[in-house]
Amino acid sequence: MSTNPPQDRIIIFDTTLRDGEQSPGATLNVDEKLTIARQLARLGVDVIEAGFPFASPGDFEAVQKIAAQVGSPDGPSICGLARATQQDIKAAAEALKPAAKPRIHTFIATSDIHLQYKLKKTRPEVLAIAEEMVAYAKSFVDDIEFSPEDAGRSEPEFLYQVLERAIAAGATTINIPDTVGYTTPAEFGALIRGIKENVPNIDKAIISVHGHNDLGLAVANFLEAVKNGARQLECTINGIGERAGNAALEELVMGLHVRRRYFNPFLGRPQDSEAPLTNIDTRQIYKTSRLVSNLTGMLVQPNKAIVGANAFAHESGIHQDGVLKNKLTYEIMDAQSIGLTDNQIVLGKHSGRNAFRTRLRELGFDLADQDLNRAFVRFKELADKKKDISDRDLEAIVNDEIQQAPELFRLELVQVSCGSNARPTATVTLRTPDGEELTDAAIGTGPVDAVYKAINRVVEVPNQLVEFSVQSVTAGIDAIGEVTIRLKHEDRLFSGHAANTDIIVASAQAYLNALNRLCAALQQGASLHPQRGAGLTSTDPAIAQSRI
C-alpha cells in the first residue's frame, strides 16, 4: 500500500462474513459464504473480511476459497482476522495465499478494563506484543490492519503510543473499534480527531472505524468519524453482528450518497462535486440485503432504513398526494438507486430458458448451469400456479435454490389435515441419507406444529424451535411465502429458509433445512468461533476470548 493513502474517498470494509456471522443463529457454511462474497464483490466493497482462519477448519476453508475465487486482481482485497498471536497470524497468512490482494487484520485489547480482567497484562507488555505481531504479520503480506480492541474506552495517551508503534512496525490501516457500542457521535469524532493530531506517523496509514450498535449510534458515530479523518468504514449488510449488530453498510453508503454535498468538503472536494464518495454500486444494495437475509435467516424489519419493506412505502394520504405530484416531496432517494425496480410482471408460463436466464442476469444473478436448471424447474412450477411472476418472485426462487444447505434428509411428501372441528394432523415422507424413505405422522396444535412433530419423529435429533416467521414476497393470494426458522440444539442456533406458494410446504422445507445444518454440524463435530469461547487452541484463555 502507498505510504500516502488516498484521503478523498471512503473505503468500504465489509465484515458480514466475519463479525456478521457472529450473530446468534447466523452461521453460514462455506458455499453460502462464497455466494455472499461474490455478491459483495459485485456490490463493489473494497475489502471483504472473509473470516477468522484460526477459528476452525471451516473458517479456514471459507477464507481460502474466497481468496481463490473472489480475490482476483481487479476484485476486492480479502482479509483474514487474527489475534495478536503467531499461530493466528500464520493461519491467516496461509488461508489468504490465493488472494491477489491479501490483508491480515490483527488485534489486541488496549483498555485498562480489558488489560486487567481479560488479558491480565501490563501496558508495556501489550505495547510490545502489538509491535511484534504487526511486524510478524508484515513478514507475510504488505497490507496489515491493526486494531486496538475496546479503543473507545482506552486511555488516549496509551492508545496513541500503541498506534504509533503499530504503524512503525508496518500497519497500513489503523482501525479504531467501539467494541461495546459505548461512545456517542461527539465522543467518537473527538477520538478520531485526537488520533489525527497526536499520532506522529498517522499520515502513513488509513484511519478505519469499527463499531457496534448497542445504543443505536453506530452509523451516526461513523459519519462523525468521517468528518474527523476516518477513511475506512467497517460495516455489515443489514447491520448484522454480535448483540445489537454493527454499523449497516447500506445506511452508511446511502447517507454519504444522499448527503454528498455535505460530506464533500470534509474529504477535500468541492461542495458541488458529483463524484461518488465510495466505490459501491448502490443498485446492488437491495439484492445483497435480500441474499444475506435469506442465507443467514435474519429477517429485515419492515421499517429498516434503506432496505426495509416500508422504506419507500407511503400510506398517509398527504404523503401519497405529494409523491404522486413530485417524488422529491417525501422521498430523499430514488428506490431504483438501491436496485428496486418498477418492473413487476416479467415472465410467464410460456417463457423459455433463455428469457429466464436473461432476466436473471438483468437482476444480477449469473448462475452456473446446474443452479440455473434447478431454478428454471422451480420457475415453471410457479408459473403453473401463478399467472404473473415478478422480479421479487424470481429473486425468492433463486435465493432459495442457491442456498447450499447440506441435503442429508430430503422432503418427499408433506400432507396435512386440519379445520375448525378437526385435530391438525400431518404426514411426512423423508428420504434419509442412506436413501431409505421413511413415513410418519403426528398431531399438533396446528398444521405446521403437526408437520414439525412428524419430521422430528423421523429425524430423531433433539432440538427446540425458537423462532418461526412467515413473509409474503408479493401481494396477492397466490404470492410466494418465505418461511424462516431457527432451531436450538445444546445452546447452538441453526437457521432454515424456504420459499413456496404453499406455506405448509415452505414451513416443512425450512425446518428440514435447519435440521440438515444441525445434523451436518453434529457429524463434523464443528466447533464454535474463538470469539464465542469454544473450540480454542490458545493457551491463554483471556486472549482466546478476544473480539473486536
Image (tube, rainbow, N blue to C red):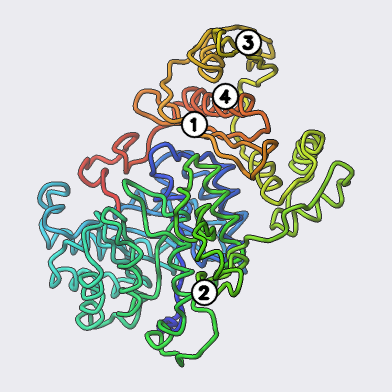
Which residue shows up at 45% across the image and 62% down it?
249
Residue 331 versus residue 302 in the image, above or below = below
Q: Quadrant of the C terminus?
A: bottom left
- Distance between the Cα atoms at labels 1 and 2? 39 Å
Q: Secondary structure at mark 2?
A: helix
Label located before the other in sequence (3 or 4) = 3
Type of the residue with mark 4: Leu
- Distance between the Cα atoms at labels 3 and 1? 20 Å
Residue 134 versus residue 545 in the image, above or below = below
Closest to the observer: 78 or 305? 305
Neighbor class of circle 1 (other Cα within 10 Å; few <14, some 14-19, many 20+) is: many
Q: Secondary structure at mark 4?
A: helix
Q: Identify the disc placed on residue 427.
A: 3
Contact (Cβ within 8 Å) of mark 1 with mark 2? no
Q: Quadrant of residue 247?
A: bottom left
Q: x and y percent of residue 424 in the render? A: 55, 11
Q: Identify the disc placed on residue 512.
A: 4
Q: Nearer the viewer, mark 2 or mark 4?
A: 2
Closest to the observer: 452 or 332? 332
Q: Identify the disc placed on residue 474.
A: none
Q: Nearer the viewer, mark 1 or mark 4?
A: 1
Which residue shows up at 53% across the image and 32% down it?
496
Q: Identify the disc placed on residue 329.
A: 2
Type of the residue with mark 2: Thr
Which residue shows up at 74% across the image and 59% down it?
362
- Distance between the Cα atoms at labels 2 and 3? 54 Å
Label located before the other in sequence (2 or 4) = 2
Label located before the other in sequence (2 or 3) = 2
Q: x and y percent of residue 1 in the render? A: 45, 76
Type of the residue with mark 1: Ile
